Each structure stands twice: as C-alpha cells, then as structure tokens.
Amino acid sequence: MPFLVLVLRNALRHKLRTALTVVGIVVAILSFGLLQTIVAAWYAGADKAAPDRLVTRNAISLTFPLPLAYRDKVRAVAGVKAVSYANWFGGIYQKPANFFPQFAIEPESYLAMYPEYRVPEEELRAFVRDRKGALVGRKLADTYGFRVGDTVPLRGTIYPGTWEFTVRGIYDGEDAKTDTSQFFFHWDYLNETVKKRSRGRADQVGVLIVQLEDADRAAAVSEAIDAQFASSLAETLTETERAFQIGFVKQTEAIVVAIRVVSYVVIVIILAVMANTMAMTARERLSEYATLKALGFPPVFVAGLVLGESLAIAVAGGAIGIALTFPAADAFAARVGTLFPVFQVAQGTVGLQLAAAALVGLVAAALPMRRAARVNIVEGLRAIG
C-alpha cells in the first residue's frame, strides 16, 4: 500500500476528530492572516513613502503651523528640487463616524510630487480651475458614493463653519498599495476664508512637502532646512516621508504590538490542540506500530506515518484558512471603510500562514513520532485484543 494512501486513511479514520481539528486550524490560520494584514495596513503609509520626499513641520508639534513664507526659503536650500504645502482640515462629513483624511493643498505643485495619484486630465484641469473644487480618491468615492459634480459639505472642527466643496475629480492609484481614501481641496480657498474670519491664522501651513534632487542627500538637506530656522519663532523638524508616517504609527504602537502578539498566541493555542490530537492518535495505535515493526518496517517508516498524518491535517486546514483569508479581508475592508486606506493580503502574509500551518504539523507530531518509533514490539503487541 503506497505510503501517502496509508497516511490519508489514517487521517480519515476518526472523521469527526479530524474534521474538528481541521476546523480549528482553519479558524487559527484565518485569524492569524487577518491580524497580520491589519498590522501591515497600519504601516501601509510608511511602506509607500517615496525616498525623495521630505516633510517639514513645526518642531513643537503638528498642531503648530508654519508661516507660508518658509516655502521660498526652503526652496532655496541646496538639493531641494520643489516645495509644496498642505494643511490638515479635520472636517466632519454628516457624522463624526465618517472619518477620512482631508487636506488643503496647492494643487499643481502638490500633485506633481505624487505621480502615484492618477487623475484624468480633464478632471485635473477642472479641479485646478475651481477654487471650491475637490479631488477625492477612488476608495473614498466608492465608500460614500461621491461622483464628479456632487457637492460635499464638511463641518469644520479646526476651522469652524460649514464648508461646501464640489467634486471635480476622482483619482486612482498606480497600484493597490496607493492610498485612495483622501480628500483634497484648494489651500487658497481655505486661506481666503480664514483671512475674513480670523486674520491671525492666515498665511500659515501645516507642513511643507519637499522633493529632493537626490534621495541619497535626504539627511544633509533635512539638517540644512532645520538649521535655517534654528533661531526663529517657529523652528522646524524635517524628516523623510517614511519617518513622518511612522511617527503616526508609533502613537498607537501598543495596539499594533498587542495585535501582533495575539496573532501568534492564536497559533500557539491551535498548536496545543493539534499536539493533543496527535498524542491521542499515537496512543491508540501503539499496537499497530508494534505490528509494523514486527513485520520488518523500520522505525523511520512508523514515525513517518505519524508525521505525514499530522502534516496532512495541518496543511489541509492551513490551505482552507488561506483561501478564506482573501474574501474575509475584502469583507472586513468593506466594513471599516476608509479607516484602513490600504487593506490587502500580502504575499508575505500568505507565506507566514503556510509556515505557521507547517510548523503546527511538525511540532505537534514531534513527541508522538518519538513514541511510535521507540515502541517496544512485545509491549505493543500485548495491547492487541
């Protein structure tokens, strides 16, 4: 009888036990994959950051603005190719739960630095021409049903009042990892309105976006920019776009660590369940293993039967769990809306799931294999009957 057929028949001998074990592994591998995907989504902004972009902000905090006049001074620093700017708006659409990033930008210079945002030429021109126009990402548009020409009212929190914008364009990403959940509008429109309501807050920006001529000079250019404003009323902190994004992740690092730990705890739990299953199996079949050894089969063959059965169950559960991860991730992403701008199962996550399933099969079989290989023929045969 071929070895693999014997392994399969052994695995299916106790169908209910095997089925319950497989279900447990499916749940564990599925949970592990989703939790790892959540962690990856947390870092998606940092992973997509361009190496030739810097972000300059107020050294005290992001809540403190910078004078718009800094733009020209930064542009004059050696190694700087272009400079743009943006303000976080923080408005509410209909209700507080409808959260999505909103930025007041200088359209032409800002979008020129982000070629990963793909906007139809006609829509881009319409957005640039309309001071009250808005450019929204595809995911954001799909989530809230925004269409070109729609009026979107936002209730200001940082900038009080009700602000109305007309959607002039919808941008797509160059790939699935591009954030398409953002809402952009004209900084000039924001600034003109602020001048009328609170002139002291006008002509200020939240961050300066700096594009480098050479990405390898990021550290030197950052130091030069900050040195230029070292003695000013608004000192600056310049860092790479990746470092800037990671700064936000670190604010919730405890949550990220907890999710990562839980994902591995799930694997440890199912490992214990699987090990118990294989221990029971080996204990029940000692007489069979003794018979095989009496017939001349070597200990390696007997141990291989245990290992093969364990791997078969673990890999079957792992394969089903991996297959279910993709629709589960899509359903989860649809429920959370724009909370995670990029939410997709990465190849690395699938690799970790496969490795986890294989590890469960190997470790769970370790002790039962040893016991089966070392079973005493005489003592094992006494159990027959």
Image (cartoon, rainbow, N blue to C red):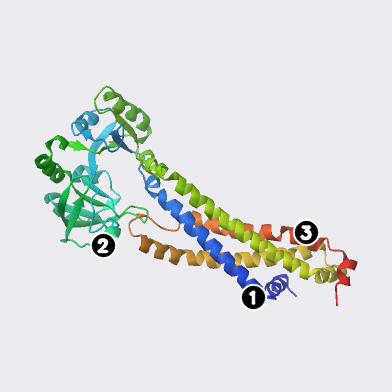
* N-terminal label among 2 and 1: 1
Q: Which amino acid does label 2 sit on?
A: Tyr
Inspect this view and state whether residue 105 appears. yes
Name of the residue lying farthest toward the right: 378
Question: Nearer the viewer's eye, disc 3 or disc 1?
Answer: 1
Furthest-bottom residue in this view:
385
Give me the residue at 29% from left, 53% from top: 100
Percent coordinates x, y for residue 334 in the rendering = 36, 63
Q: What element carries label 3?
A: helix
Tell me the amino acid under the disc marked 3: Arg
The location of residue 260, given as percent across then percent down, is 51, 51
Per the image, label 2 sits on a secondary structure element best described as helix
Alpha-carbon span between mark 3 and mark 2: 59 Å
Q: Which mark is residue 16?
A: 1
The residue wearing badge 2 is 144
Q: In which quarter of the image is the C terminus?
A: bottom right
